[in-house]
Amino acid sequence: MRALGPYMKALSNISQIRTETLAALTVSLALVPEAVAFAFVAGVDPLVGMYAAFIIGFVTSLVGGRPGMISGATGALAVVMVSLVSDHGVEFLFITVVLMGIIQIVVGVFKLGTLIRMVPFPVMLGFVNGLAIIIFLAQLESFKIEGEGGVKTWLPLIDLAIMLGLVALTMLVIYALPKLTKRFPSALAGIVVVSALVILADINTPTVGDLSSIAGNLPVFAVPDVPFSFETAKIILPFAFILAGVGLIESLLTLSLIDGLTDTTGQKNRECVAQGVANVVTGFFGGMGGCAMIGQSMINIKAGARWRLAGVLAALFLLLFILFASSLIERIPIAALVGVMFVVVIGTFSWSSLRIIQKVPISDAFVMVLVSAVTVATDLATAVVVGVIVSALVFAWKTALHLSLVVAEGTTEFRRVYSLQGQLCFASVSSFKELFRPASDPDEVIIDFQNSRVWDHSAMEAIVDLAQRYDRAGKRLFLLNLSQSCHGMLEKANVLLEPAGENDPGYRVTITGLGGSSGGS
């Protein structure tokens, strides 16, 4: 059996390569209509979206920090690009994408990608649910037709019924095939079955070709044709920072989601650098920029892809579509791709969040719903920032409520020992000050910090202010069980802590050091 080990491993690798290849084909087909649609949203030629999907997908899959994650042109970035393109033209978009990439590289190099750990779980659930809703709403556009004056209306009843029927058939194939075999990606099977039905039965329904032709040549390197001046910098800098932020937030949250699905750990800072490199290259080759795509990433992972191979092949398939197979791809019915994305929506939405919403704290439930709503109403970056801020404020409020003072052992007629319970930070400073009454305390007061922690400058200043209050009252203040970080923080503020005598605990706060504090009263 040991001798068969290498052969079994080889067979396993061959099987995985087949899985990766089929997953890549499915993903590439799902990328086409979205790349075209997002190009329209941004106000650029469809090939600009296709080039972005190819280049970004290829580079990030090759050198990124999360094997199996798919990147390309996204709607979250497209909506930010609209005003830039309409006001200044596509060349300004290209140079902005280059600058966006440079900013992302800097974020990765300085290891700022790990800041994604600051995103609380309710915000993550809100992000997932909001993005699922956005993907769903985006598919509804496929059921509409542009009428007079550019106003979109629903398809005629018969055409709408045909579309819905084909979407339902696609979803049925996707859900039914795994019960028969798992050797072929069900999403790809759904696309093939519905496409064959439409072509052979000559069913009149919208196809990819109705969106736009995707035929083209290889992308060509070109330095964006813009004046390199201070005025140009003023125009592109704000857009570059916004695009970089939105792109990184969506990419890192998608990375975290896939980490959870695969029980593996991606490299966040490496992914930041890879996204940046991809966008720099894209900008010089006429692409609109992009980031990770949760929908296509879910398709890839659910199809069994775990290596970098699937992402690389998906990008290469896109290039082949552009160069050689555009006429074939353009015959794929939109309904088949909409059906695939509806399945992605169902799989992406965290249905468990609906069950637990009444079991979690009200604040967490509120944050979850808020992030979902803001994601749909504005954009992902705004939603995540809002969610993190609200979560931080809730945490600060709860921290302030859980600060208390207990009279501890060792208290006598001439000495009182207080045990501080809870976290001392900016949110709890007011409560901390109200706990002490220097005028009514004995001559010696000891504050034991064993069950507390000094977190920030506001807390430090509160201690300094308290020491001054006791000094003015003619009382001596001692601090017991200060952590090294707290001790160092007070020393930096020019507060002198003198070791107490053999019979005295902790450190005595001396009045000579208090005068140098910037926040003393």
Image (cartoon, rainbow, N blue to C red):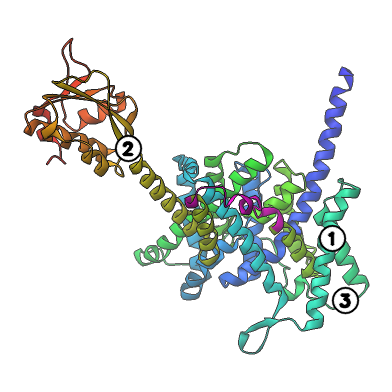
Q: Amino acid at mark 1?
A: Leu
Q: For the magenta stretch, what is the residue range? A: 346-363
Quadrant of the snapshot with the C terminus = top left
Residue occupied by mark 3: 203
Report which residue position mark 1 lands on.
172
Q: Is residue 350 left or right of residue 200?
A: left
Q: Position of residue 147 (x, y in %)?
A: 67, 86
Quadrant location of residue 132? bottom right
- First in residue order: circle 2 vs circle 1: 1
Question: Mark 3 or 1 closer to N-term?
Answer: 1
Tell me what residue is drawn at x 77 percent, y 69 percent: 334
Q: Which residue is mark 2?
A: 403
Mark 3 or mark 1, whichever is nearer to me: 1
Q: Could you tell me if residue 295 is visible in this image?
A: yes
Which of labels 3 and 2 is toward the front?
Answer: 2
Three-letter amino acid code of the residue under disc 3:
Ile
CA separation in Å, label 2 and label 1: 57 Å
Whether 435 is drawn above or below 161: the answer is above
Report if residue 356 lies within the magenta region: yes
Q: Looking at numbered disc 2 in the image, what kind of residue is underneath it?
A: Leu
Asked whether the beta carbons under mark 3 and mark 2 sit within 8 Å of each other, the answer is: no
- Magenta stretch: includes residue 247: no
| Residue in the picture at 80% in, 73% down | 163
Measured in 3D between alpha carbons, the distance from the residue under mark 3 to the one under mark 1, in whole angstroms, is: 19 Å
